[in-house]
Every structure is written in structure tokens, then in C-alpha cells.
Amino acid sequence: MFTGIVTAVGRIDEVRDLGASQAHGKQLVLQVAPDYLADVGLGDSIAINGACMTVTEFDAPAGRFRIDVSAESLARTAGLDRTGPVNLEKALRAHDRLGGHVVSGHVDGMGEVTHFAPVGESWELRILAPQALGKYLAYKGSITVNGVSLTVNRVSDSAAGCELSINLIPHTVENTALHVLSVGARVNLEIDMIARYVERMLTAGTNPAAPSA
């Protein structure tokens, strides 16, 4: 579990093929500040741009670690198949503060940046989310964008999907990898976990399976 509070901005330095075909995934080599890995062990979970991944090898003094990403994960996420800056968050510990909201590290869909520009001292970020995710997005609700817990300021539904507007304060822009976004960029989205359970409670039993023959 995670909180959507980014604990470091790392960088994917290398992307290696794990096989010769598209059925194979990638191995990523990431660079981060050396002290970030001081309490990390093999098999630990770290969210990378909002996707929960497992540390398979690390060199704490050098600030480098590796993860393996399956072809399935690559097909359902953005930004894990190329070098560049990424948001990192270690898994939540029982005694940690829940500064953002409850995040699973499982990407629900990919959105597309439609607008990213300064407004006063802040920045407005608009993202077109898949239509299927629109029902989970609400004014003042929570959304995770590339691993960052954010608050939805406005939603607008259309045939193309659901456009959400988010206000980013300078601290968020400066201390996450969101500052590299531009119009047309793809981002990882995770909806509020509570919304998923509410939907299940409201729809359970409304569409029972047909009896077997």
C-alpha cells in the first residue's frame, strides 16, 4: 500500500529487454539519491510513477536499483518503457502518516494531458481520462496521477472521456516529476480505492450470472 506522497524523484537510466519478442518485458535500472535505499531490501515494493514494482537488485551506496516489468504491465502503464525522471514512493509502513490517500499502486487506466499551464502562482493540469473511469471521478475527490495523490477540482464528461482539472501548487511541481509533463503526454491513473468498493456494494447482485445448464 502507498499514500500517493512522492518520497523521491528518481531516473530510469537503462531499459533492457528481458527477451526477444513483445511477449517479454523489460528490466529497468534506476538511479536515485544513495540514502534513499538505506532501508530497502530485496523484494521490497516501490511505486514507480504510480505502479507498484519489486526491487530485484540494488546497490545502496551507488543509489541504483533494478526492477523487472512484465509485458502486461508495460501495456497498461505509461512511462516505464523509456529513460527519464519518475516519481518514487516506498511501500507504506504501519506507523507512517497517511498524508495523501490510500493507494494500491495498481494503475486503473492511462490518461492524456490536454492542458498544462501556469495560473497565478500555481499550475492547472487537465487530463482526459478513459470514459470507463469517469464514474469514479468527483469534485474534490482523490486521484493518483503518476503516483501523486491529487485533488480533482473539476470534471467534464464527453463522448471522448472524462476531463479532470487539477491545481498543482509550486511545491508539487518542484518536488515531483510532474513538471516534465506536456500536452499529449500519457499518465498513469489510479482511482480512489473507496470508490471501487462503493460501486461494488451498490451493484452486487444486480446482474446475477445465468444458471448453468
Image (cartoon, grey):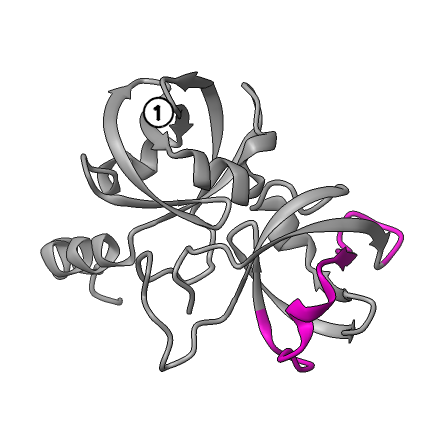
| 8 is within the stretch colored magenta | no
- Residue at figure coordinates x 49%, y 71% from the top left: 91
State which quadrant residue 136 falls in: top left
Quarter occupied by the N terminus: bottom left
Residue located farthest toward the front when viewing the structure as drawn: 121
34 drawn magenta: yes
Note whether 145 is above or below 104 in the view shown. above
Give how far across and how far down residue 171 sits, in percent: 45, 40
Q: Is residue 156 above or below residue 20?
A: above
| Residue 93 locus on image (x, y percent) | 42, 78
Q: Residue at label 1?
A: 161
For the residue pair 21 and 162, the one nearer the viewer reads as 162
* Quadrant occupied by the C terminus: bottom left
**Residue 118 percent across, percent down from the top left:** 43, 18
Q: What's the residue at 72%, 44% (across, down)?
A: 81
Residue 63 x, y percent position in the rendering: 77, 65
Q: Report the amino acid beneath label 1.
A: Gly
Q: Is residue 85 left or right of residue 66?
A: left
> Quick one: 71 or 179, which is closer to the camera?
179
Residue that extends furthest to the right in the rendered view of this protein: 20
Q: Is residue 93 above or below residue 78?
A: below
Which residues are the magenta region?
Answer: 19-45
Q: Secondary structure at mark 1?
A: strand
Instruction: Name the residue located 71 percent from the left edge and 58 percent from the top edge.
Output: 32
| Residue 33 placement: quadrant | bottom right
Q: Residues within 10 Å of mark 1 (few under 14, many from 20)?
A: some
Viewed as shown, does residue 173 lie left or right of 69? left
Q: Nearer the viewer, residue 170 or 16?
A: 170
